[in-house]
Amino acid sequence: MANFVEEVKAHAAANYTEDGWDFVVECWADDEIEIATAAATTAEEAIAIMADEVGVLDEHRAEIQSTIW
């Protein structure tokens, strides 16, 4: 089993303001990233898996923010 935690964290840091990647930087521990991406066989797959995970969180955040006004 490959571990792509560092690649995912680097991608998250580089894309901090985009599509919910700030959640990974601010909230996800290394072991949580490792568990979430356990099925990945490449770094690109791991990043795609995490993109799906944080995309849902980002959509939820946008829905909440839309109710402010």
Image (cartoon, helix red, strand yellow):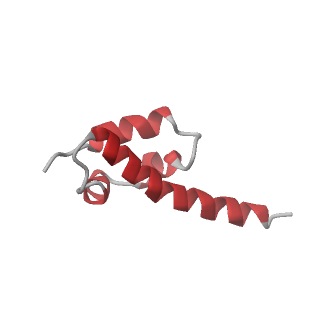
* 8 to the left or right of 20: left
Q: Position of residue 55 (x, y in %)?
A: 53, 55
Outermost residue on the top side: it is: 14
Give coordinates of residue 17: x percent, y percent.
59, 40
Residue 24 x %, y %: 44, 49
Residue 59, compared with residue 18, is above or below; it is: below
Q: In the shown orientation, is residue 6 left or right of residue 18? A: left
Which residue is found at the position 23% from the left and 56% from the top? 38
Q: Residue at x 49, y 52 (%)?
A: 23
Q: Is residue 17 above or below residue 53?
A: above
Residue, x 31% and y 53% (percent of image)?
33
Residue situated in front as seen by the camera: 22 or 46: 46
Q: Quadrant of residue 6?
A: top left
The part of the image, by quadrant, that contains residue 7 is top left
Q: Is residue 5 above or below residue 37?
A: above
Residue 62 shown left or right of residue 16 in the figure: right
Q: Nearer the viewer, residue 52 or 16?
A: 52
How many numbered markers are drawn?
A: 0
**Quick one: quadrant of the C terminus?**
bottom right
Residue 40 versus residue 34: which sits nearer the camera? Answer: 40
x and y percentages locating residue 46 in the rendered image: 32, 47
* Residue at the farthest left position: 1
Residue for point 58% across, 41% down: 18
